[in-house]
Image: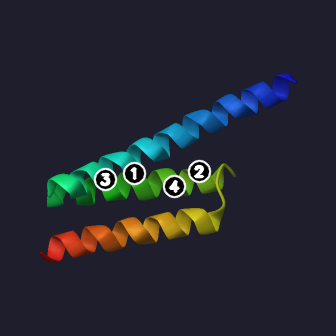
Amino acid sequence: MRVTVKKTEKNRKIKGQFRSAIKATREAIAKGDKDKAQENLKKSIQALDKAVEKNVIHKNTAARTKSRLNKTVKEMVKK
């Protein structure tokens, strides 16, 4: 039981980090702030990679999320 509690807490922390990073990226995209979006995209990718490394999310889920964010940021930068 105690191991489960510890792992749950660790996973929550990691999930919170990458969710916050993704949210910040999406907010920057919505505001149209290109520099901030690109900066937050890098942080999001790092956070997602760390979550995959720690087996919190599946690698394909992270790849899909990174791809979608990257695509959105690139489209915004082109405009």
Mark 2 vs mark 1, foreground winner is: 1
Q: Give me the C-alpha separation between circle 4 and circle 3.
A: 13 Å
- Identify the mark nearer the N-term, 1 or 4: 1
Residue labelled with disc 1: 22
Q: Residue at the location (37% across, 65% down)?
A: 69
Residue labelled with disc 3: 25
Type of residue at label 3? Thr
Residue labelled with disc 2: 51
Q: Position of residue 30 (x, y in %)?
A: 21, 55
Q: Give me the C-alpha separation between circle 1 and circle 4.
A: 9 Å
Colouring method of the image: rainbow
Mark 2 burial class by Cα count in 10 Å: few <14, some 14-19, many 20+: many
Query: Tag 2, which secondary structure?
Result: helix
- Image quadrant in which the N terminus is located: top right
Residue labelled with disc 4: 48
Q: Residue 20's image quarter?
A: top left
CB atoms of marks 1 and 4 within 8 Å: yes
Q: Position of residue 7 (x, y in %)?
A: 74, 33
Mark 4 burial class by Cα count in 10 Å: few <14, some 14-19, many 20+: many
Mark 3 vs mark 2, foreground winner is: 3
Type of residue at label 4? Leu
